[in-house]
Image (tube, rainbow, N blue to C red):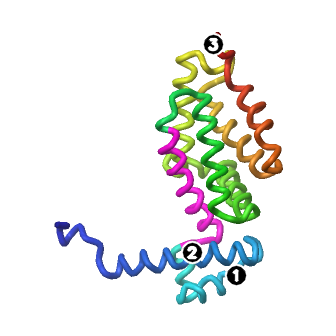
Amino acid sequence: MALPALSPSRRERASDVTRARLYEAALDEFRRAGYEQASIARIAEAAGVSRPSFYFHFPTKADVLVELEYGFGRDIAERLKRARSLREAFEVLVDGLLEAERSVGNGELFREMLVVTMRRTAAGRFDADSFPALVELARHFEEGAARGELRAGVDPARAPLLCLASVFGIQMSVEPDERAADYEHLFSLYLGEEPS
């Protein structure tokens, strides 16, 4: 039984429900109209709330995509925790992103989400708490370096973010049926020789 002081209030629960409705309405609007053309007024109307209510929950349209990306990042991080090698971590990362792209159901919206993520990175608003998959990828780079899986001369502290940005670049700019070769080439830049 939850303690009354720790239980969410009716107002907090209502706020959570409103946020969830706005989130889903925003994603629907982005899919329908495109991210740039999406209307906050239409999102609020579809969620049954006022326009200021949208801004209370999401200061910008980009914040909806940040939340979308965070959910995928958490899922990919959980999968990365189970990877047993740096190569397997790369495969898990790519599989997770491909699955995320399919679940969004709109390639343009998925690419826009990656653009928002990369803009946050460039602006220095990208920390470990905001992208858990990066934390797990960094752990694999460190452990891979210790096991001799990482190519000599690659800095395991800097490489994860560079690798992730490159993966995002491939996701955004390469046709799906051509990505496998690009991923393999990218990962070969980081992986040392396979043991015989």
Cβ atoms under marks 3 and 1 closer than 8 Å: no
Q: Position of residue 91 (x, y in %)?
A: 63, 37
C-alpha gap between disc 2 and disc 1: 14 Å
13 displayed left or right of 159: left
Q: Residue at x 62, y 82 (%)?
A: 43
Q: 96 above or below 26? A: above
Q: Check disc 2 and report the residue beneath it.
A: 24
Amino acid residing under circle 2: Glu
Q: Position of residue 95 (x, y in %)?
A: 63, 45
Q: Residue furthest top?
A: 196
Label 1: which secondary element: loop
Q: Position of residue 26 (x, y in %)?
A: 62, 75
Amino acid residing under circle 3: Pro
Q: Assign the C terminus to one quadrant of the image.
A: top right
Amino acid residing under circle 1: Ser
Q: Which label's residue is closer to the chain start, 2 or 3?
A: 2
C-alpha gap between disc 2 and disc 3: 48 Å
Q: Check disc 1 and report the residue beneath it.
A: 39
Q: Which label's residue is closer to the chain start, 3 or 1?
A: 1
Range of magenta residues: 58-80
Q: Check disc 3 and report the residue beneath it.
A: 195
Label 3: which secondary element: loop
Q: 171 above or below 194? A: below
- 10 Å neighbourhood of mark 2: few (<14), some, or many (≥20)? some
